[in-house]
């Protein structure tokens, strides 16, 4: 069991949502911190059927004079239940914890998100800081940071099952798509766009599907918190910029489990994409947990100058370039140099697979493992 960086929402003494992909540790965290809570799991088929038919039955499941927390696990299964939660907060003063895998999905259904009466928190895969001495960069690149993937003796089998479970339970059972075969083919094809500028028409062509269908499938991945489309940084742009976002599945291990690999695939290329994915998921987690307030982008000009991650917020403007190679050259800094030429306010970091920190022309060249361990202080500018 690892301590999470997420500040305990329990201190606010107010109802809250806790969103995150399956397997990131939401339920484990709640059982550890809310052992005495009334726990209602909407994955329980009997409970699901009862409350789906009559959401008002929720009150009958709560003991009289109950004063502790009430956990509703997987709230997106019964969105209509939120109206009853709202009523019970107002009428009885109950405190609810509602977990789920899609805040965006609930909003798109137009359901009651409690009008500010409940805070919202997110949970991500484990971070290098949370893993501490157990962090192993090579293992992280292969298996990612889902807690169970790191805890099992067969992480590859766990990740394969995880992908299948998501397809079956989230996509098929929720009726998000009628053709699971089409979606599975799309998912494999989309994995080749990982950490790349996304061309939906090309993905559609490779998967043999319509562009409209592929666009809806990408929206499903985002709704389920399985993927993010990262926008280009275009503030005060002095050059012509690309218009399309970059695509990332949320965890390096999940990416490796989805992407088909064979003798024609370069291990170095896959490792490089996994490393960029790992850095991205860590930046997202630290930014949220420590409430750094950054918006996250990438930067790429029409002539190919690129920086992997741009963080823009109250604490400043940060630029991160990531390479797997154990050695670096001045050429590797060209994207950062171009960006800083346009944005001299920026602080630039080059993360690589070596083992020595150096400083060149105002940039910090840092081993990836060290950078991930220091990421909270880098983002907080301490």
Image: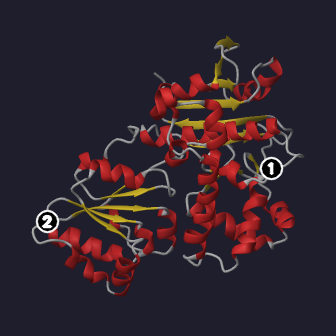
SS of the residue at dot 1? loop
* Residue 146 visible in rendering: yes
User: How far from the left and from the top, in percent, is residue 195?
Assistant: 72, 45
Horizontal side of 299 relative to 283 (left or right) equals right
Horizontal side of 9 relative to 247 (left or right) equals left
**Residue, disc 1:** 261
Q: CA distance from mark 1 to mark 2?
A: 53 Å
Q: Relative to the observer, which residue lies in front, 33 or 232?
A: 33
User: How far from the left and from the top, in percent, is residue 49?
Assistant: 39, 83
Q: Relative to the observer, which residue lies in front, 129 or 236?
A: 129
User: How far from the left and from the top, in percent, is residue 88?
Assistant: 22, 72
The quarter of the rendered structure image containing the N terminus is top left
* Residue found at x 11% / y 72%: 64
* Residue found at x 31% / y 81%: 55
User: How far from the left and from the top, in percent, is residue 376?
Assistant: 47, 29
Kindly identify which numbered label has been placed on residue 137.
Answer: none
* Residue 310 visible in rendering: no
Q: Point out the residue furthest to the right here.
A: 264
Horizontal side of 374 relative to 85 (left or right) equals right
* Residue found at x 63% / y 64%: 164
Give above or below for 173 relative to 128: below
Q: Relative to the observer, which residue lies in front, 64 or 148?
A: 148
Give above or below for 179 relative to 24: below
**Residue, disc 2:** 66
Residue 359, quarter of the rendered image: top right
* Residue found at x 65% / y 30%: 320
Q: Relative to the observer, which residue lies in front, 281 or 93?
A: 281
Number of dots carrying numbers:
2
- Asked if labels 2 and 1 touch by Cβ distance under 8 angstroms, the answer is no
């Amino acid at each position: 069991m690892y301590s999470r960086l997420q500040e305990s929402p329990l201190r606010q003494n107010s109802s809250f949502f806790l969103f995150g992909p399956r397997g990131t540790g939401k339920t484990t965290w709640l059982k550890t911190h809310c052992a005495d809570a009334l726990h209602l799991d909407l994955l329980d088929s009997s409970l699901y059927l009862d409350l789906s038919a009559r959401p008002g039955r929720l009150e009958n499941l709560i003991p009289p004079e109950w004063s502790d927390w009430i956990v509703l696990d997987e709230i997106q299964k019964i969105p209509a239940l939120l109206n009853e939660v709202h009523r019970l907060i107002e009428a009885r003063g109950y405190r609810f914890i509602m977990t789920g895998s899609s805040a965006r999905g609930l909003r798109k259904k137009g359901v009651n998100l409690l009008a500010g009466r409940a805070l919202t928190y997110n949970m991500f895969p484990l971070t290098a800081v949370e893993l501490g001495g157990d962090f192993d960069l090579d293992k992280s690149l292969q298996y990612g940071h889902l807690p169970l993937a790191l805890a099992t003796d067969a992480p590859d089998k766990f990740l394969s099952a995880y992908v299948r479970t998501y397809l079956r339970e989230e996509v098929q059972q929720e009726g998000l798509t009628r053709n699971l075969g089409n979606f599975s083919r799309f998912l494999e094809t989309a994995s080749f766009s990982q950490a790349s500028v996304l061309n939906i028409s090309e993905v559609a062509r490779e998967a043999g599907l319509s562009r409209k269908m592929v666009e809806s499938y990408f929206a499903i991945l985002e709704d389920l918190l399985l993927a993010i489309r990262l926008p280009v940084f275009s503030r005060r742009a002095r050059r012509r910029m690309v218009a399309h976002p970059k695509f990332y599945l949320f965890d390096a291990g999940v990416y490796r489990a989805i992407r088909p690999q064979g003798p024609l695939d370069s291990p170095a290329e896959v490792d490089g994409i996994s490393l960029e994915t790992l850095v991205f998921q860590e930046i997202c987690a630290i930014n949220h947990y420590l409430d750094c307030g950054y918006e996250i982008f990438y930067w790429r000009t029409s002539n190919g100058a690129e920086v992997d991650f741009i963080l823009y917020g109250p604490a400043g403007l940060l630029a991160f370039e990531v390479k797997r190679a154990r050695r670096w050259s001045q050429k590797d800094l060209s994207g950062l140099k171009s960006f800083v030429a346009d944005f001299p306010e920026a602080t630039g970091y080059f993360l690589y697979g070596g083992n020595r920190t150096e400083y060149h022309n105002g940039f910090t060249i840092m081993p990836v493992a060290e950078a991930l361990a220091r990421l909270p202080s880098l983002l907080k500018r301490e």
